[in-house]
């Protein structure tokens, strides 16, 4: 591993932590000696990184620090390209376009050889097989999630029973054949999952729900302890 790569990994290790972390922990994570770790910390501080702390106490990177044009490993480049292509086939048009724009911005600051690898990576994402089209605008749903506002829509469950729902949307899961909204349902007074292809006449009511989405997500995950972060449990009947 080059020193530049090691320094980047050190910044990333500090970024992942909000509290001071001991130098020994960082050295072990980077597979270097404690002496090397201390030298690397001083090198980053000398380059302007706002790292606070000292040997024997721990180190923390102040929020808001931006690195100059980054170097990426080949795996990181493939992950970026794969995520963008996945968004293009699973998300709505606006989100897919945003992902492409973000990737273009990253490519613009990469060295030519890495930018070329981004263009020529061999990962291909196939479109969903036999997926039913959504009956509502995913962009509208995403906006309601981001703004923490109530969402109203008609819903037909797997038994063909139609209801009108008002929910507090917290997340959307992208499955192979369907997209699923996780929300607190005012009708059921519980968390429920709704397939977007069974929703219709969706309206963002523009009224904030009384709880914070972060807290709702925490409560939902406590009910589904086996579900990793960023994933979703098998849909509960709506």
Image (cartoon, helix red, strand yellow):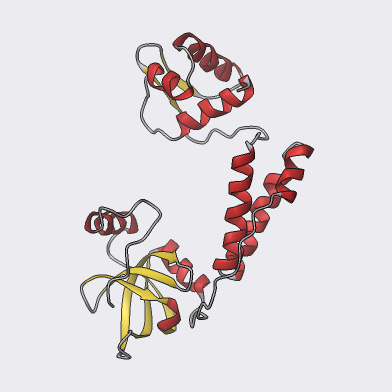
Q: Position of residue 216 (x, y in %)?
A: 28, 59
Tell me the quarter of the image containing the C terminus.
Answer: bottom left
Residue displayed at 61% across by 66% down? 126
Residue displayed at 71% across by 47% down? 118
Residue displayed at 74% across by 50% down? 120
Closest to the observer: 176 or 84?
176
Residue displayed at 67% across by 56% down? 101
Picture quadrant of residue 86: bottom right
Picture quadrant of residue 84: bottom right
Picture quadrant of residue 95: bottom right
Closest to the observer: 115 or 53?
115
* Left or right side of 176 for 189: left
Q: Position of residue 232 (x, y in %)?
A: 36, 61
State how many labels appear: 0
Check the image and name the residue furthest to the top. Answer: 35
Closest to the observer: 177 or 180?
177
- Figure check: 14 above or below 58: below
* Left or right side of 55 for 114: right
Q: Is residue 134 visible?
A: yes
């Amino acid at each position: 591993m080059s020193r530049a790569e090691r320094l980047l990994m050190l910044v990333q290790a500090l970024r992942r932590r909000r509290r001071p972390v001991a130098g020994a922990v960082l050295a072990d994570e980077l597979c270097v000696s404690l002496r090397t770790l201390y030298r690397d910390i001083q090198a980053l501080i000398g380059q302007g990184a706002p790292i606070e702390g000292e040997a024997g106490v721990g180190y923390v990177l102040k929020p808001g620090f931006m690195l100059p044009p980054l170097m990426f490993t080949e795996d990181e480049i493939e992950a970026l390209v794969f995520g963008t292509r996945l968004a293009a086939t699973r998300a709505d048009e606006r989100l897919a376009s945003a992902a492409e724009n973000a990737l273009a911005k990253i490519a613009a600051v990469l060295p030519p050889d890495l930018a070329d690898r981004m263009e020529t990576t061999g990962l291909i994402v196939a479109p969903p097989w036999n997926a039913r089209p959504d009956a509502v605008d995913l962009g509208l749903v995403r906006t309601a999630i981001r703004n923490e506002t109530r969402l109203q829509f008609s819903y037909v469950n797997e038994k063909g029973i139609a209801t009108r729902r008002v929910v507090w949307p917290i997340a959307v899961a992208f499955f192979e054949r369907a997209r699923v909204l996780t929300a607190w349902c005012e009708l059921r007074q519980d968390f429920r999952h709704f397939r977007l292809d069974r929703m219709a006449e969706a309206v963002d009511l523009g009224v904030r729900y009384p709880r914070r989405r972060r807290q709702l997500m925490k409560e939902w995950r406590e009910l589904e302890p086996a579900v990793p972060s960023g994933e979703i449990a098998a849909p509960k009947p709506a």
